[in-house]
């Protein structure tokens, strides 16, 4: 393909993405970096809201509830209803409720995870639960790990909300679910099952929540190995943005490619908010 053809095909691909009725959008590296909003993000979200798109903001972290994410975005300068956030905790609760309705769980995790399970009809049980569920946790201890091991050995299934091994914090890198679950899995001699990205279960759950078809939906993310692969495996058009961990060379080392690569989400809405105001 020559340069002109490449330009035309990505310009028409941008139109395809703009015409989607629903968007599933990763947050860290796409909307914000830690506590800093990224250029173009507010304009993009404003465009989603003004043009009545359906949208969900996705995070693999299971620590915060949708309401806490709503408050975080408010601090960063934009109001988004809590119903537009989807965490690996919500995906885990939704998935477990389809596997064992009204089940029981022993949880190592924070309020975001425990509340999601309660809302999905689960109750807490530290004697003979159906599942041991592990998420990001600040109350992780030798006692909780030992308890989890004994419950898994008695037959509880071991679930991780997300496979990430580390996450960002004010103090630097901290262990995330993928690392926290390992002592339990190794000691009990089992393989955990992870729900968050790149498991396409997370994307299918998100589609269900959006009440949209995959053909009408686009996924936006900054990681090839989580956001883009789970979009591809769920059969959804994907947009890689270069505002996070990826640069223009990153897609070259993967066997799959996104539908479109953009500098930032701002490119999707560029010039469109002004057009709406003129009408
Ligand atoms: Mg990201």
Image (tube, rainbow, N blue to C red):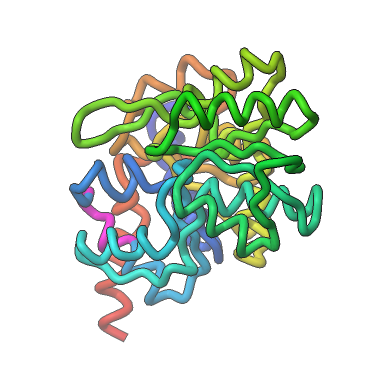
Judged left or right of residue 188, residue 155 is right
Residue drawn at 36 percent across, 41 percent down = 262
Q: Quadrant of ligand 1?
A: top left
Residue drawn at 39 percent across, 73 percent down = 49
Q: Could you say where residue 235 lies in the image, as x and y percent from the top left?
A: 68, 43
Q: Is residue 15 above or below residue 234?
A: below
Q: Is residue 149 above or below residue 122?
A: above
Q: Is residue 22 above or below residue 276?
A: above
Look at the image and say whether residue 39 sits in the magenta stretch: yes
Q: Is residue 190 above or below residue 31?
A: above
Residue range corresponding to the magenta coloring: 38-44
Judged left or right of residue 199, residue 220 is left
Residue drawn at 47 percent across, 54 percent down = 112
Look at the image and say whether residue 252 sits in the magenta stretch: no
> Between residues 220 and 68, which one lies in front from this camera angle?
68
Q: Quadrant of residue 43?
A: bottom left
Q: Is residue 225 visible?
A: no
Say which quadrant the C terminus sits in: bottom left
> Between residues 23 and 168, which one lies in front from this camera angle?
168
> Between residues 154 and 69, which one lies in front from this camera angle?
154
Residue drawn at 49 percent across, 59 percent down = 56
Q: Could you say where residue 196 lies in the image, as x and y percent from the top left?
A: 57, 39
Judged left or right of residue 154, residue 17 is left
Q: Is residue 155 visible?
A: yes
């Amino acid at each position: 393909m020559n340069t002109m053809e490449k330009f035309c095909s990505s310009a028409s691909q941008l139109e395809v993405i703009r015409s989607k009725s629903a968007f599933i959008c990763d947050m860290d590296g796409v909307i914000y970096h830690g506590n800093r909003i990224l250029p173009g993000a507010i304009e993009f979200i404003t465009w989603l809201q003004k043009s009545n798109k359906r949208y969900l903001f996705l995070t693999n972290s299971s620590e915060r509830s949708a309401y806490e994410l709503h408050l975080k975005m408010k601090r960063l300068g934009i109001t988004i209803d809590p119903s537009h956030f989807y965490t690996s905790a919500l995906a885990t609760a939704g998935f477990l409720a389809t596997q064992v309705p009204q089940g029981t769980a022993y949880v190592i995790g924070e309020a975001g995870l425990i509340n999601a399970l309660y809302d999905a009809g689960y109750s807490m049980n530290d004697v003979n639960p159906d599942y041991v569920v592990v998420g990001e946790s600040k109350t992780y201890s030798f006692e909780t790990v030992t308890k989890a091991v004994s419950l898994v050995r008695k037959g509880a299934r071991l679930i991780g909300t997300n496979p990430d091994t580390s996450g960002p914090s004010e103090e630097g890198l901290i262990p995330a679910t993928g690392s926290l679950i390992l002592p339990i899995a190794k000691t009990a001699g089992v393989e955990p099952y992870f729900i968050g990205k790149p498991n396409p279960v997370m994307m299918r759950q998100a589609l269900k929540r959006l009440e949209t078809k995959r053909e009408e939906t686009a996924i936006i993310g900054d990681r090839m190995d989580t956001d883009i692969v789970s979009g591809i495996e769920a059969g959804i058009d994907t947009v890689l943005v270069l505002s996070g961990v990826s640069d223009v060379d990153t897609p070259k080392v993967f066997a799959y490619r996104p539908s479109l690569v953009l500098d930032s989400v701002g490119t999707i809405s560029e010039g469109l908010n002004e057009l709406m105001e003129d009408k």
